[in-house]
Image: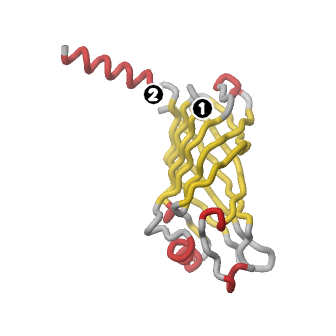
């Protein structure tokens, strides 16, 4: 009886995992540069993301201290003063790709993604984010961009540097998810 339970658990786990694609090397970048001032740009290349192809559910997890800037001092200020990454170490996105249909992915397809972005302890609804998704063999590639404002996440920008940082922050992502 015990062996039968193990076999059933193994079969159900494999069935459950069939529609899951995962990455731990996703890329997320943001830019808040203003012309004539130093570039305010960072990239993170170790983002975890998962997609369930059976229902279109998608989730991503970012360890905030993983963002890398060209300027080490800017990175330090980002972590200590703006993102407060010791207090808020993670950023997450949880959502659903609308009308997701894996057979359409043989060619690149665009979808709308709705969900919740949590950063700096604040959660913002994201609606109708256009994502581009394609599938080749056992790899799903998902890309997109969106804009956010620091104020939406209660991030205070001191007046002395506010003219050097864009109000609209351009966020881009690229996930190459492999079959789990």
Cα separation between marks 2 and 1: 14 Å
Query: In the figure, is residue 22 to the left or right of 6?
Result: right
Q: Residues within 10 Å of mark 2 (few under 14, many from 20)?
A: some
For disc 2, the marked residue is 17
- Label 1 Cα crowd, 10 Å radius (few <14 / some 14-19 / many 20+): some
Secondary structure at numbered mark 2: helix
Q: Provide residue 49's location: percent of width, then percent of height.
A: 53, 44
In terms of sequence position, does the residue under pointer 2 or pointer 1 come before the other?
2
Q: Along the line of sight, which residue is nearer the eye, 39 or 162?
A: 162
Residue 126 image position (x, y, % from top left): 66, 48
- The residue at which mark 1 appears reads as 56
User: Residue 115, how many percent across, how many down?
Assistant: 61, 44
Question: In the current view of this chain or complex, which residue is farthest to the right?
Answer: 35
Please tell me whether residue 71 is drawn above or below residue 22 in the rendered image.
below
Specify the farthest residue to the bottom. Answer: 160
Say which residue appears at 24% left-offset and 14% top-offset: 4
The residue depicted at 52 percent of the width and 40 percent of the height is 50
Asked if the residue under mark 1 is in contact with the one under mark 2, i.e. CB atoms within 8 Å, the reply is no
């Amino acid at each position: 009886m015990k062996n039968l339970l193990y076999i059933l658990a193994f079969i159900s786990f494999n069935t459950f995992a069939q529609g899951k694609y995962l990455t731990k090397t996703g890329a997320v970048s943001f830019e808040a540069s203003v012309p004539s001032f130093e570039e305010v740009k960072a990239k993170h290349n170790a983002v975890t993301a998962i997609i369930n192809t059976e229902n279109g559910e998608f989730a991503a997890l970012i360890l905030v201290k993983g963002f890398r800037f060209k300027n080490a001092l800017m990175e330090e200020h980002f972590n200590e003063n703006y993102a407060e990454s010791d207090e808020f170490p993670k950023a997450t996105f949880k959502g659903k790709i609308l009308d997701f249909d894996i057979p359409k992915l043989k060619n690149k397809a665009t979808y709308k993604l709705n969900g919740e972005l949590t950063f700096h302890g604040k959660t913002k609804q994201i609606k109708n984010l256009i994502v581009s998704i394609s599938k080749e063999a056992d790899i799903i590639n998902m890309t997109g961009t969106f804009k956010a404002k620091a104020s939406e996440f209660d991030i205070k920008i001191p007046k002395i540097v506010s003219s050097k940082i864009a109000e609209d922050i351009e966020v881009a992502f690229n996930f190459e998810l492999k079959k789990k």
